[in-house]
């Protein structure tokens, strides 16, 4: 896996990352740190990546289990240390799974498998942060 991050020059503290798969992602800092608030902060991007990683796992596991899943959303809320390095210390993830007749046990199992075995992002972040999960199922 590769990624190149370029400073966007005259745009304060904005950076553009080009991934090895050829995609582009912008990041910026807060105005009080020299940024112009043009894009997500790098730590927001890290949190979004963890959410995407675990949501991907949960959907894949449920679909492989032949459950009628029609939607999956995960809302993340994180706390950071007060001192540098300001690592994540707590991350709460609330999953909302939409579908027909999806058993709660299957959702609970999919979330556990993601966090214990498959999602490298949340497993790494779990080294510094307590990760809490919850879920609800919505019939659709």
Image (cartoon, grey):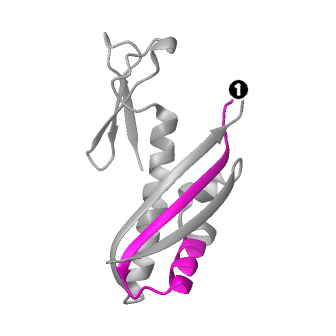
Is the C terminus in the top left, top right, bottom left or bottom right quadrant?
bottom left
- Determine if the magenta segment contains residue 90: yes
Instruction: Name the residue that disc number 1 marks.
Output: 84
- Residue 67, how many percent across, how many down? 38, 87
Range of magenta residues:
85-114
Viewer-closest of 2 and 65: 65
Viewer-closest of 22 and 132: 132
Relative placement, left or right, of 30 versus 111 is: left
Q: Residue furthest front?
A: 139
Identify the image quadrant of residue 98: bottom left
Relative placement, left or right, of 21 versus 122 is: left
Identify the image quadrant of residue 82: top right
* Residue at 32% over, 14% down: 11
- Residue 23, how many percent across, how many down? 27, 44
Relative placement, left or right, of 109 versus 70 is: right
27 lies above or below 8? below
- Residue 133, how many percent across, how many down? 61, 63
* Residue at 29% over, 50% down: 21
- Determine if the magenta segment contains residue 135: no
Q: Secondary structure at mark 1?
A: loop
- Residue 26, how many percent across, how many down? 33, 32
* Residue at 45% over, 14% down: 31
47 lies above or below 75? above
């Amino acid at each position: 896996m590769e990624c190149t991050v370029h400073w966007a020059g005259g745009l304060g503290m904005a950076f553009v990352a080009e991934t090895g798969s050829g995609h582009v992602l912008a990041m910026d800092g807060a105005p009080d740190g020299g940024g112009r608030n043009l894009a997500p902060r790098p730590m927001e991007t890290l949190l979004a990546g963890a959410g995407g990683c675990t949501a991907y796992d949960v959907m894949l596991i449920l679909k492989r289990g032949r459950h009628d899943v029609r939607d999956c959303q995960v809302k993340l809320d994180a706390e950071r240390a007060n001192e540098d390095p300001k690592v994540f210390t707590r991350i709460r993830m609330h999953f909302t799974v939409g579908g027909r007749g999806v058993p709660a046990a299957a959702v609970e199992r999919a979330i556990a498998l993601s966090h214990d075995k498959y999602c490298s992002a949340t497993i790494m972040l779990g080294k510094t942060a307590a990760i809490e999960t919850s879920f609800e199922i919505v019939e659709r």
